Image (cartoon, rainbow, N blue to C red):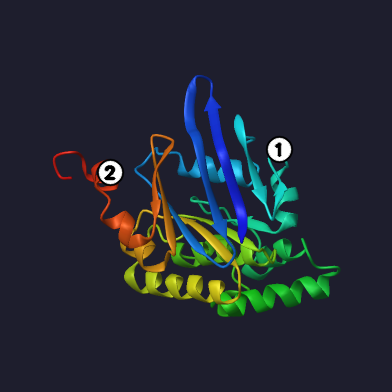
Amino acid sequence: MSLLEVRKVSRFFGGLAAVKDVSFSVNKGEIVGLIGPNGAGKTTLFNVINGFYAPSRGEVLFGGSRISGLKPHQICRQGMARTFQVVKPLQRMSVLDNVIASAFLRAKNRAEAVAIAEDTLRFTGLSGDRDMISRGLPLGKRKRLEIARALATQPELLLLDESFAGLNPAELDDSIDIISRIKEKGITIMIIEHHMKVIMSISDRIVVLSYGEKLAEGTPAEIGSNPQVIEAYLGEERA
């Protein structure tokens, strides 16, 4: 069953089509990768999906309801959360308080928000850093905090924008484990990622963008052997 449907979505900035006539769906329980060369329109598409931009054309449906034109906080309340490529925690607040702030989306009082936040920190392996001021965290843990903040809103669908960028091999393994456990909790995931080994290993399906348009869609095996995808990444001669 489709949880997210993107129907012929376009987003223009002046005369530039950053995204053009893109359609795909994400089913409940899937991990769907979104890949493409730099400038392909991936983050712009995420911004349309979660309400930072309204689509210039087309529509987005979540849980069968049209969400195009809603604000990000309204879409988040409906069950969609996202992380950002450039992590921006509440820098003067502790790790715990960062997650408490997100937990208040669902919590009825502070005690409930604290309970949600503490459970989320345990899940993401950040309990030992709960009292640290977030700006003092190394990059790997800031990335994990970004995921924890999104999870504290208790989403059905989690959009991850390059959550693996800049991580060392050990941090990559930890993050892959967290993503796998998020899926086991029944949360659907859509992820933008340039690390091809990661995206091929965790995705059920992959959507490929190039110059703002959908170039291909399929299983990791199908995408990995698609000549058009190889050409888009490596150039015609290498393909």
Q: Secondary structure at mark 1?
A: loop
The amino acid pointed to by label 1 is Gly
Q: Is residue 169 visible?
A: yes
**Residue 217 x/y as whole percent:** 41, 51
Decide: few, some or many residues near mark 2? Use Cα within 10 Å; few <14, some 14-19, many ≥20. Answer: some
The amino acid pointed to by label 2 is Gln
**Residue 235 x/y as whole percent:** 21, 40
Image position of 79 (left or right of 39) = right
User: Which disc number belongs to residue 61?
Assistant: none
The residue positioned 64% from the left and 35% from the top of the image is 54
Q: Quadrant of the N terminus?
A: bottom right
Q: Quadrant of residue 182?
A: bottom right
Q: Quadrant of the C terminus?
A: top left
For the residues labelled 1 and 2, say whether their Cβ atoms are less than 8 Å apart.
no
Task: Residue at the far front: name it.
Answer: 1
List the residue tagged with mark 2. 228
**Residue 181 x/y as whole percent:** 53, 76
| Upstream in sequence: badge 1 or badge 2 | 1
List the residue tagged with mark 1. 69
